[in-house]
Amino acid sequence: MDKLSDRVKRLGYSQTFVMSNKARDMKASGIDVISLTLGEPDFDVPDNIKQAAFDAINENYSHYSPVPGFLELRQAISEKLKRDNQLDYKPTQICVSNGAKQAIINVLAAIINDGDEVILPTPYWVSYDEMVKMMGGNSVMLPTSYVTDFKITAEQLEEAINEKTKAILFSSPCNPSGGYYTYDELKSLAKVIAKYPHVTVISDEIYEYINYETKTTSIAQFSEIYEQTAVINGMSKAFAMTGWRIGYSACPEWLAKACEKVQGQMTSGANTVAQRASIVALKTNPSEYKYMIDAFESRRNLVFNLMKEIPGFKVLLPKAAFYFFPDISYYIGKTLNGTEIKDADDFAMFILENAHVGCVGGVSFGSPECIRFSYAASEDDLREAMRRIKDVLEKAV
């Protein structure tokens, strides 16, 4: 008898961590590898947030919190959503979780039955499809490309929705493309979604602060689908708090209560010290942390100019987040230094093994013709990484 469940056998490993671990192993063996694989800010947590954590320890915040989080934190999230997103959510509509990943899983667990369909515009974050599988659902991929700025249209969405559709899950700003949907684009999608009240929108907005042009719009701002929308966010990206594991969902009351029920049987409340520190982070004016955004923007501009010189790369200037997602379809079907390139994952492995630069192939993002680079790294490393890739490809073609 097979000891593993069918559910776990359906799941794949995160390609992000596969490539990160491969790069780490090569580095441990003495190879000079520059890893641009993980989506993690390379800054330390700001001092005022760290001090809030020390204070919480000294004040003995060492016991269980309420399952959906401390009321003070949910109030701070409510105030942040009003201040930054023009969204009205009461604390009872907010569930604080162990990272934004759990917030998404809570929502999916609350609404997905076996065989339900979840629409995923491509490219999507690598875990989305696996989360849907975990809950017994089926992903329906809506393809985009470099040509369409990696965004779907309202017409595509309308064509994809049917009686089996239970949710639409997407990120804006987007991991991995670095793009985002404009107000008008989201308005056109909202008009379609409003026709189908059985469909829930799961809007992952974890990168909202890392934006180089303007404030992003949340699709929950459109009143006609407010009762159909779950907003996902957290502390990891804007506050460099990836290891603190604080995320949250803001939902209509019916869904917020269901998320609390799910979380109550899985993990209960999130880390209490991290919750107390998050209150301080959210209450601080976002301009206090803008130095990180400014550094990311400088790196983005540097990499864009260097990447444009790499043969065979088609690259868009990212408007948000800290990723590049170049189209490398020029190389698919070619043989480079004896390596057959069947898709972007093969190409990413070729770059790692020959240029000693770690990136992530786009197959697990739903875009097998693209690769993802994180530019959450020093400018010296970014310059050297782009130089290595350019040199290897110029010689291999």
Image (cartoon, rainbow, N blue to C red):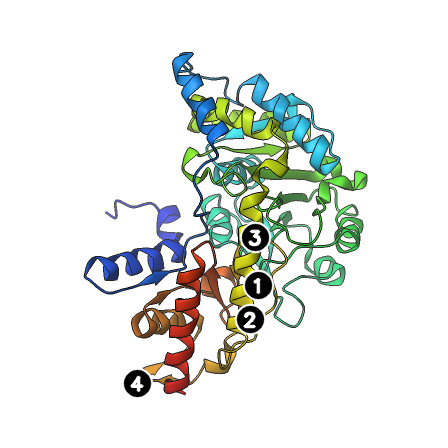
Mark earlier in primary sequence (3, 4):
3
Residue type, label 4 = Gly
> Quadrant location of residue 319?
bottom right
User: Mark 2 = which residue?
Assistant: 305
Q: Distance between the residues labelled 1 and 2?
A: 6 Å
Q: Nearer the viewer, mark 3 or mark 1?
A: 1
Q: Residue furthest left?
A: 29
Q: How far apart are marks 4 and 2 (CA)?
A: 30 Å
Residue type, label 3 = Ala
Q: Residue drawn 41% across and 62% down?
A: 380
Asked if the residues shown at circle 1 and circle 2 are in contact, with their CB atoms under 8 angstroms apart, the answer is yes
User: Mark 4 = which residue?
Assistant: 338
User: Mark 1 = which residue?
Assistant: 301
Residue type, label 1 = Asn
Q: In this view, does 78 lie to the left or right of 294?
A: right
User: Mark 3 = which residue?
Assistant: 321
Q: Is residue 40 left or right of residue 325?
A: left
